[in-house]
Image (cartoon, grey):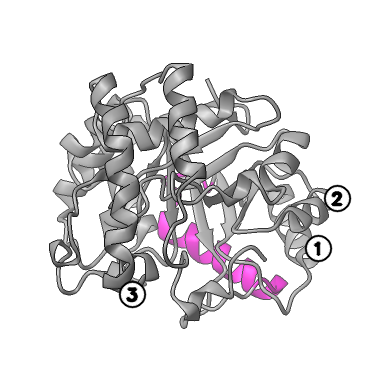
Amino acid sequence: MPTILGKDIGAIGLGLLNLTNPAKNLSHEQAFAVLRQSLESGATFWDGGENYGTPDANSLHLVSNYFAKYPEDVDKVLLSIKGGLRPDRTPDGSPDAVRRTVDNCLHILTGRKELDLYQCARVDPDTPIEDTIKTLGELVQEGKIGGISLSEVSANTIRRAVKIHKISAVEVEVSLWEDHVLNDGIASVCAEFDIPIIAYSPLGRGFLSGQFKNVEDLPQNDFRHLFPRFQPQNFSRNLKLVESVQSVADKNGITNAQLAINWVRQLSQRDGHPVFIPIPGASSPDRVKENFTVVDLPPEDLAEIDRLVHSFETAGGRYPEMWAKQLNG
């Protein structure tokens, strides 16, 4: 069982983004049903953001309201929150901004839940990472946060950060169509310092589940229309990866989503790798049940998936150009 901050957490965690996404327009009752089902499915690591939603209805508001209704669940959950973004969503890792955003998170939680893990969503290029981590370390000492995580960082930034304070987790994108962490030193440095990797978007923002057959399957106002990999010229090319792993999923009697998530999870079992904890999202209890099913794929099927992944070149970048420059700081 993976552990963070000395607490056992499930093999698969829950990403909270969709639960406060205005485009999804979920009611509290609908979101609460997802949260309850995640606990029943063993997902006790919840990953949210100060910017997931609106300033008046983000992940922190959601979990605060949830724990007001279900206080018996507070101690079951390890809550990780991203912050450190200006209103225009550019990063601000300056000491004053870090303190301000942490205080805002705590204010929204109203004492109903501790801020177990905190991370700046992106690295601020204008603030040395040492200054950001030093401030977060002070906040740990003050009892305002339980531990420090990093998000979308390079291997070099991780090495600089661990010299200042213990890093409890590193969150990066990992999936069948995005395995850069295995090749750019991030996974190896995390293994060196025994830091678990929180793998966000293990389903490629839903694409790898196979639920979309063409661009028209996406709602008109869906934010994914902004992403290069969902553009018409790239969509059909990327769909070939989904189609190629379908036979492996069928062979194991699982869905494409379950294959994609568990492939990421089983990266943990390889020599020289850290623990990988995929954090798919969900917007219904049934989707939670599907996505949080732990399946141990046999070695020969893992090898087949690896062959398919390594021979496939994903079409399009991870993020739109306006956000891509903030990656791997």
Magenta region includes residue 112? yes
Name the N-terminal-most of marks 2 and 3. Answer: 2
**For the point 43% across and 33% down, which residue is it?**
305
Pointer 3: what residue? 226
Left or right of 106 on screen, residue 284: left
Q: Looking at the picture, how far across and down is residue 260, in whole percent?
A: 37, 37
- Please tell me whether residue 64 is drawn above or below residue 125 in the rendered image: above
**For the point 44% across and 50% down, which residue is it?**
177
SS class, disc 2: loop
Q: Nearer the viewer, residue 114 or 167?
A: 167
Calculate the distance from the C-alpha at mark 2 to the C-alpha at mark 1.
8 Å
Q: Looking at the picture, how far across and down is residue 35, in whole percent?
A: 28, 39
Residue 10 visible, this orientation: no
Q: Nearer the viewer, residue 236 or 211?
A: 236
Residue 37, disc: none
Magenta region includes residue 28? no
Answer with the quarter of the image where residue 274 lies.
top right
Pointer 2: what residue? 163
Left or right of 246 on screen, residue 154: right
Q: Amino acid at mark 1?
A: Glu
Span colored in magenta: 93-115
Q: Amino acid at mark 3?
A: Leu
Q: Looking at the picture, how far across and down is residue 39, in whole percent?
A: 32, 30
SS class, disc 3: helix
Q: Looking at the picture, how far across and down is residue 118, in whole percent?
A: 58, 53
Pointer 1: what residue? 130
